[in-house]
C-alpha cells in the first residue's frame, strides 16, 4: 500500500487510510445513497465495500467456507461483507477492524445474529488478536495496512487450529523499480513472504476482475460525482478518486494483478 500512498492526494485533516479517516469514511458511507449506488455499479452488489473484491470473487470465497467453521476476519470494516458470508455459508464469524465507528455500525445492525456473528474493535498491528483455534483466518484487502507481511502472517498463523487455513485476497502492482517477474504467480510480494516462511499454499487468479474493477471504479466515481456532492458526501467521492486514477492506469497498462491465497496452517512456525 505504500506505493499507493505516494500517489494519493491530500484528503484533509485525517491521513488517508488512518483509523480517523476510515471512521469518517464509514460514518458517511453507511448513510449514503450515492455510495450504495456506487457499490452496486462497481462490485455487482452493495456491501459497503472499500476493497477490490467483486461479487464473483466474493462468491468464490464463500464456496471455500463450510457451515459452522470458526472464522476470524481481519479488516472487516462495517461488516456487510462479513454478514453476507455468514448468511451464505453458515459460518461462525468474528470480524475485527480498528475503525470503531464501523464496528459500532456492524454490532448495531447484527445484534440479533450475535450467536454466530460478532464484531470487535482491534488494531491488527498493535493488539493481541482475540480467540484461538480458528478454522479460517480471512483478510480481504486489509493485509497491506500491516506494513510487514512476514510479521502479520506469523501473527495470523498462530491463531489457527492445526489443519486450519488462511485466505488472503491481495493485489500486486508493478512499479518501475520492480522486477518484471513481480506480476507472475509465485513471485508477488505476498508469495515472497509465504515462501520465506515456508507456508504451503495455492492461489486463485482474479487479475481480470481487479482490472475491470478499477476501470468501473474510475468511471462510476465520475458518473456519480454530482450525486455525492448533492448529498454532502463529496468526501466519499474524493476518497475514491484519490486512488482510482493510479489503479486504472495500472489496470490499463496491465501492471496490476490479484490473487486469492489459500494458505495451510504452518505448525513449524508455531514451534519457532
Ligand atoms: C481497503 S479496506 C477493506 C475493507 C473490506 N475488507 C472490503 O474489502 O471492503 C481496509 C480495512 O482495513 C481496516 N484496517 C486498516 N488498518 C487496520 C489495522 N491496523 N487494524 C485493523 N483494521 C485495519 C480499515 O479500517 C478498513 O476497514
Image (cartoon, helix red, strand yellow):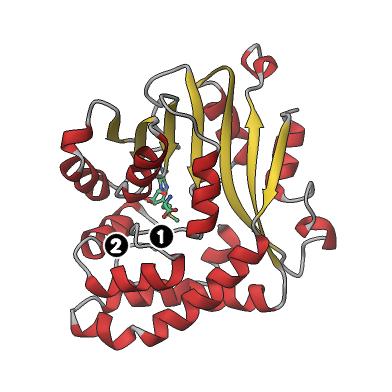
Would residue 131 be found to the left or right of residue 151 on screen?
Answer: left
Q: What residue is shown with label 2?
A: 25
The residue at the point 66 percent across, 21 percent down is: 266
Q: As drawn, is 56 to the left or to the right of 129?
A: right
Q: Find residue 103 and report its horizontal and vertical position in percent.
A: 26, 44
In the picture as drawn, the residue positioned furthest to the top comes out as 271
- Classify 10 Å Cα crowding around label 1: few (below 14), some (14-19), many (20 and above): some
Q: Is mark 2 within 8 Å of ligand 1?
A: no
Q: Residue beneath label 1, please? A: 50
Q: Which mark is residue 6?
A: none
Is 68 drawn above or below residue 106 in the view shown?
above
Tell me: residue 42, above or below residue 197: below
Q: Are marks 2 and 1 in contact (CB under 8 Å)?
A: yes
Observer-side mark, 2 or 1, equals 1
User: Which of the two discs, 2 and 1, labels the residue nearer the N terminus?
Assistant: 2
Secondary element at image label 2: helix
Q: Nearer the viewer, residue 17 or 241?
A: 241
Q: Position of residue 230 (x, y in %)?
A: 20, 85
Please tell me whether mark 1 sits on a helix, a strand or a loop.
Answer: loop
State which quadrant residue 35 falls in. Answer: bottom left
Task: Determine if the C-beta at disc 1 is less than 8 A from ligand 1.
Answer: yes
Amino acid at each position: 500500500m505504500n506505493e499507493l500512498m505516494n500517489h494519493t492526494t491530500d484528503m484533509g485533516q485525517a491521513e488517508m487510510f488512518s483509523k480517523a479517516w476510515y471512521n469518517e469514511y464509514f460514518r458517511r458511507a453507511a448513510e449514503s445513497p450515492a455510495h450504495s449506488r456506487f457499490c452496486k455499479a462497481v462490485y455487482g452488489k452493495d456491501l459497503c465495500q472499500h476493497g477490490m473484491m467483486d461479487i464473483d470473487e466474493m462468491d468464490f470465497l464463500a464456496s471455500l467456507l463450510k457451515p459452522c467453521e470458526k472464522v476470524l476476519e481481519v479488516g472487516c470494516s462495517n461488516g456487510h461483507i462479513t454478514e453476507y458470508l455468514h448468511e451464505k455459508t453458515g459460518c461462525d464469524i468474528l470480524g475485527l477492524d480498528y475503525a470503531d465507528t464501523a464496528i459500532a455500525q456492524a454490532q448495531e445492525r447484527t445484534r440479533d445474529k450475535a450467536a454466530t456473528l460478532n464484531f470487535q474493535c482491534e488494531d491488527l498491528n498493535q493488539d493481541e488478536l482475540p480467540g484461538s483455534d480458528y478454522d479460517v483466518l480471512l483478510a480481504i484487502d486489509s493485509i497491506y495496512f500491516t506494513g510487514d507481511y512476514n510479521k502479520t502472517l506469523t501473527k495470523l498463523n498462530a491463531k489457527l487450529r492445526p489443519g486450519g487455513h488462511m485466505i488472503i485476497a491481495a493485489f500486486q502492482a508493478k512499479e518501475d523499480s520492480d522486477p518484471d517477474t513481480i506480476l507472475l504467480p509465485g513471485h508477488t510480494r505476498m508469495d515472497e513472504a509465504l515462501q520465506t516462511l515456508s507456508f504451503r499454499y495455492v492461489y486463485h487468479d482474479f487479475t481480470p476482475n481487479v482490472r475491470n474493477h478499477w476501470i468501473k471504479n474510475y468511471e462510476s466515481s465520475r458518473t456519480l460525482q454530482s450525486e455525492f456532492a448533492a448529498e454532502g458526501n463529496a468526501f466519499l467521492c474524493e476518497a475514491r478518486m484519490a486512488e482510482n486514477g493510479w489503479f486504472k492506469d495500472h489496470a490499463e497498462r496491465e501492471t496490476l494483478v490479484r490473487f486469492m491465497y489459500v494458505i495451510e496452517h504452518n505448525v513449524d512456525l508455531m514451534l519457532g
